[in-house]
Amino acid sequence: EAEGAILHANPKAYIVRTSGLYGLGKGNFVQRMANLAAPNVEPFKDGNGRWLMPTAPDRPTVFSNIFTRPTYTDDLAKNIHRLLADKKPPGIYHMVGAERCSWWELARAVFTLMGNGDGPVADEYDPNKRTPGTARRPLDPTLTSTKWPYLPSYRERLSIYLRELGYNPIEWPEAAPC
Protein backbone atom coordinates (compact mmCIF):
# COMPACT_ATOMS: atom_id res chain seq x y z
CA GLU A 1 0.00 0.00 0.00
CA ALA A 2 1.52 3.29 -1.15
CA GLU A 3 0.04 5.32 1.70
CA GLY A 4 1.60 3.04 4.29
CA ALA A 5 4.97 3.26 2.55
CA ILE A 6 4.79 7.06 2.52
CA LEU A 7 3.91 7.25 6.20
CA HIS A 8 6.62 4.72 7.05
CA ALA A 9 9.24 6.70 5.09
CA ASN A 10 8.04 10.03 6.49
CA PRO A 11 5.97 9.83 9.68
CA LYS A 12 5.31 13.61 9.40
CA ALA A 13 3.50 13.22 6.07
CA TYR A 14 -0.11 14.20 5.44
CA ILE A 15 -2.27 12.19 3.06
CA VAL A 16 -5.63 13.59 2.04
CA ARG A 17 -8.20 11.31 0.43
CA THR A 18 -11.15 12.88 -1.35
CA SER A 19 -13.95 12.00 -3.75
CA GLY A 20 -16.08 13.32 -6.61
CA LEU A 21 -14.13 16.54 -7.18
CA TYR A 22 -15.69 19.47 -9.02
CA GLY A 23 -14.44 23.03 -9.37
CA LEU A 24 -12.68 25.38 -11.74
CA GLY A 25 -9.73 23.98 -13.67
CA LYS A 26 -9.82 20.91 -15.85
CA GLY A 27 -13.16 19.45 -16.86
CA ASN A 28 -15.09 17.29 -14.42
CA PHE A 29 -18.34 15.36 -14.18
CA VAL A 30 -20.45 18.30 -12.95
CA GLN A 31 -19.14 20.54 -15.74
CA ARG A 32 -19.94 17.88 -18.37
CA MET A 33 -23.48 17.50 -16.99
CA ALA A 34 -23.96 21.30 -16.98
CA ASN A 35 -22.80 21.46 -20.60
CA LEU A 36 -25.29 18.76 -21.54
CA ALA A 37 -28.13 20.35 -19.57
CA ALA A 38 -27.58 23.86 -20.94
CA PRO A 39 -29.96 25.15 -23.60
CA ASN A 40 -28.48 25.41 -27.11
CA VAL A 41 -25.69 23.01 -26.24
CA GLU A 42 -22.49 23.57 -28.13
CA PRO A 43 -19.38 21.41 -28.46
CA PHE A 44 -17.24 21.46 -25.32
CA LYS A 45 -13.75 20.40 -24.26
CA ASP A 46 -13.22 17.45 -21.97
CA GLY A 47 -10.51 17.32 -19.29
CA ASN A 48 -7.91 16.35 -21.90
CA GLY A 49 -8.67 19.31 -24.14
CA ARG A 50 -10.55 17.26 -26.78
CA TRP A 51 -13.64 18.83 -28.30
CA LEU A 52 -16.77 16.75 -27.73
CA MET A 53 -20.28 17.04 -29.07
CA PRO A 54 -23.04 16.09 -26.63
CA THR A 55 -24.81 12.90 -27.54
CA ALA A 56 -28.39 13.22 -28.74
CA PRO A 57 -30.85 13.69 -27.18
CA ASP A 58 -28.62 15.47 -24.62
CA ARG A 59 -29.74 13.05 -21.92
CA PRO A 60 -26.68 11.18 -20.71
CA THR A 61 -26.93 7.73 -19.20
CA VAL A 62 -25.44 7.80 -15.70
CA PHE A 63 -24.96 5.01 -13.18
CA SER A 64 -27.44 5.07 -10.32
CA ASN A 65 -25.74 2.39 -8.24
CA ILE A 66 -22.22 3.85 -7.90
CA PHE A 67 -21.87 6.38 -5.09
CA THR A 68 -19.63 9.30 -4.19
CA ARG A 69 -19.38 12.27 -1.84
CA PRO A 70 -19.13 15.24 -4.23
CA THR A 71 -16.45 17.66 -3.04
CA TYR A 72 -16.03 21.26 -4.20
CA THR A 73 -12.34 21.98 -4.84
CA ASP A 74 -12.48 25.43 -3.18
CA ASP A 75 -13.66 23.80 0.05
CA LEU A 76 -11.00 21.11 -0.23
CA ALA A 77 -8.19 23.64 -0.76
CA LYS A 78 -9.32 25.77 2.21
CA ASN A 79 -9.51 22.70 4.46
CA ILE A 80 -6.08 21.40 3.45
CA HIS A 81 -4.68 24.83 4.26
CA ARG A 82 -6.47 24.78 7.63
CA LEU A 83 -5.16 21.25 8.35
CA LEU A 84 -1.59 22.45 7.92
CA ALA A 85 -2.08 25.88 9.56
CA ASP A 86 -3.67 24.28 12.65
CA LYS A 87 -0.70 21.87 12.88
CA LYS A 88 -2.94 18.82 13.14
CA PRO A 89 -1.16 15.48 13.66
CA PRO A 90 0.25 13.93 10.48
CA GLY A 91 -1.57 10.98 8.98
CA ILE A 92 -4.42 10.12 6.63
CA TYR A 93 -7.40 12.47 6.44
CA HIS A 94 -10.62 12.04 4.49
CA MET A 95 -11.89 15.39 3.22
CA VAL A 96 -15.17 14.87 1.41
CA GLY A 97 -18.53 16.53 0.96
CA ALA A 98 -21.11 15.92 3.66
CA GLU A 99 -23.67 14.23 1.46
CA ARG A 100 -23.40 10.82 -0.21
CA CYS A 101 -25.23 10.38 -3.52
CA SER A 102 -25.11 8.31 -6.68
CA TRP A 103 -23.55 9.77 -9.82
CA TRP A 104 -27.07 9.77 -11.32
CA GLU A 105 -28.44 11.76 -8.36
CA LEU A 106 -25.62 14.29 -8.79
CA ALA A 107 -26.29 14.58 -12.53
CA ARG A 108 -30.02 14.98 -11.84
CA ALA A 109 -29.28 17.80 -9.37
CA VAL A 110 -27.21 19.61 -12.01
CA PHE A 111 -29.96 19.23 -14.61
CA THR A 112 -32.50 20.53 -12.08
CA LEU A 113 -30.42 23.61 -11.25
CA MET A 114 -29.90 24.24 -14.97
CA GLY A 115 -33.68 24.29 -15.42
CA ASN A 116 -33.65 21.18 -17.60
CA GLY A 117 -36.43 18.89 -16.38
CA ASP A 118 -35.49 16.00 -18.68
CA GLY A 119 -32.48 14.99 -16.63
CA PRO A 120 -30.16 12.04 -17.14
CA VAL A 121 -31.22 8.49 -17.79
CA ALA A 122 -30.50 6.14 -14.88
CA ASP A 123 -28.64 2.92 -15.52
CA GLU A 124 -27.06 0.33 -13.26
CA TYR A 125 -23.38 -0.53 -13.44
CA ASP A 126 -22.84 -4.20 -14.10
CA PRO A 127 -19.27 -5.24 -13.26
CA ASN A 128 -19.68 -8.25 -15.55
CA LYS A 129 -20.22 -5.98 -18.57
CA ARG A 130 -17.24 -3.67 -18.10
CA THR A 131 -14.83 -2.96 -20.93
CA PRO A 132 -12.06 -5.60 -21.05
CA GLY A 133 -8.88 -4.35 -19.41
CA THR A 134 -10.61 -1.84 -17.15
CA ALA A 135 -10.57 -2.09 -13.39
CA ARG A 136 -13.60 -3.39 -11.55
CA ARG A 137 -15.29 -0.44 -9.85
CA PRO A 138 -16.56 -0.74 -6.30
CA LEU A 139 -20.24 0.21 -6.11
CA ASP A 140 -19.83 2.24 -2.94
CA PRO A 141 -16.34 3.72 -2.60
CA THR A 142 -17.57 6.63 -0.47
CA LEU A 143 -15.27 7.80 2.27
CA THR A 144 -16.33 8.56 5.81
CA SER A 145 -14.66 11.35 7.69
CA THR A 146 -13.73 10.57 11.28
CA LYS A 147 -10.67 12.78 11.85
CA TRP A 148 -11.92 15.87 10.00
CA PRO A 149 -15.37 17.47 9.72
CA TYR A 150 -17.30 16.84 6.53
CA LEU A 151 -17.04 19.61 3.96
CA PRO A 152 -20.21 21.40 2.78
CA SER A 153 -22.75 19.36 0.84
CA TYR A 154 -22.94 19.55 -2.94
CA ARG A 155 -26.43 21.00 -2.47
CA GLU A 156 -24.78 24.03 -0.85
CA ARG A 157 -22.11 24.45 -3.53
CA LEU A 158 -23.46 23.41 -6.96
CA SER A 159 -25.13 26.78 -7.67
CA ILE A 160 -21.91 28.63 -6.79
CA TYR A 161 -19.89 26.43 -9.12
CA LEU A 162 -22.42 26.67 -11.97
CA ARG A 163 -22.26 30.48 -11.70
CA GLU A 164 -18.45 30.26 -11.85
CA LEU A 165 -18.88 28.38 -15.13
CA GLY A 166 -20.97 31.26 -16.46
CA TYR A 167 -24.39 29.67 -16.08
CA ASN A 168 -27.39 31.15 -14.30
CA PRO A 169 -28.76 28.26 -12.21
CA ILE A 170 -32.24 28.39 -10.76
CA GLU A 171 -32.72 28.50 -7.00
CA TRP A 172 -32.47 25.11 -5.30
CA PRO A 173 -36.04 23.80 -5.18
CA GLU A 174 -37.53 22.73 -1.84
CA ALA A 175 -38.26 19.26 -3.18
CA ALA A 176 -35.08 18.93 -5.22
CA PRO A 177 -34.11 15.48 -6.42
CA CYS A 178 -31.52 13.40 -4.58
Image: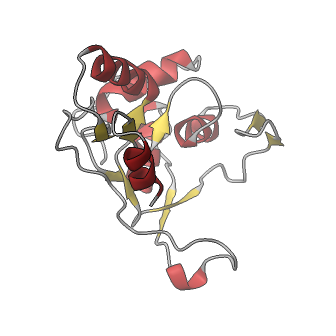
- Residue 56 visible in this rendered orientation of the protein: yes
The residue at the point 69 percent across, 76 percent down is 133
Q: Is residue 107 left or right of residue 15?
A: right
Q: Residue at x 57, y 23 (%)?
A: 24
Q: Kindly give the residue lying farthest to the right in the view shown.
A: 51
Above or below: residue 111 compared with residue 131: above
Q: Is residue 171 above or below residue 55?
A: above
- The answer to which of 113 and 75 lies nearer the viewer is 75
Question: What residue sits 32% from the left and 51% below the top?
Answer: 101
Q: 16 and 110: which one is in front?
A: 16
Task: Say whether residue 103 is left or right of residue 46.
Answer: left
Q: Quadrant of the N terminus?
A: bottom left
Residue 55 percent coordinates (x, y): 72, 53
Q: Residue furthest bottom?
A: 128
In the rendered structure, the answer to whether residue 20 lies left or right of residue 26 reads: left
| Residue at 35% from the left image edge and 64% from the top image edge | 140
Colouring: secondary structure
Front-most of 169 and 66? 66
Q: Residue 77: horizontal and vertical position, in percent?
A: 42, 22
Q: Which image quarter: residue 138? A: bottom left
Observer able to see residue 19: no
Q: Position of residue 18 (x, y in %)?
A: 39, 42
Q: In which quarter of the view is residue 95 placed?
A: top left
Q: Position of residue 69 (x, y in %)?
A: 34, 46
Total labels: the figure holds 0
Q: Nearer the viewer, residue 145 or 101?
A: 145
Q: Is residue 62 above or below residue 154?
A: below
- Choose top left, top right, bottom left or bottom right for residue 42: top right
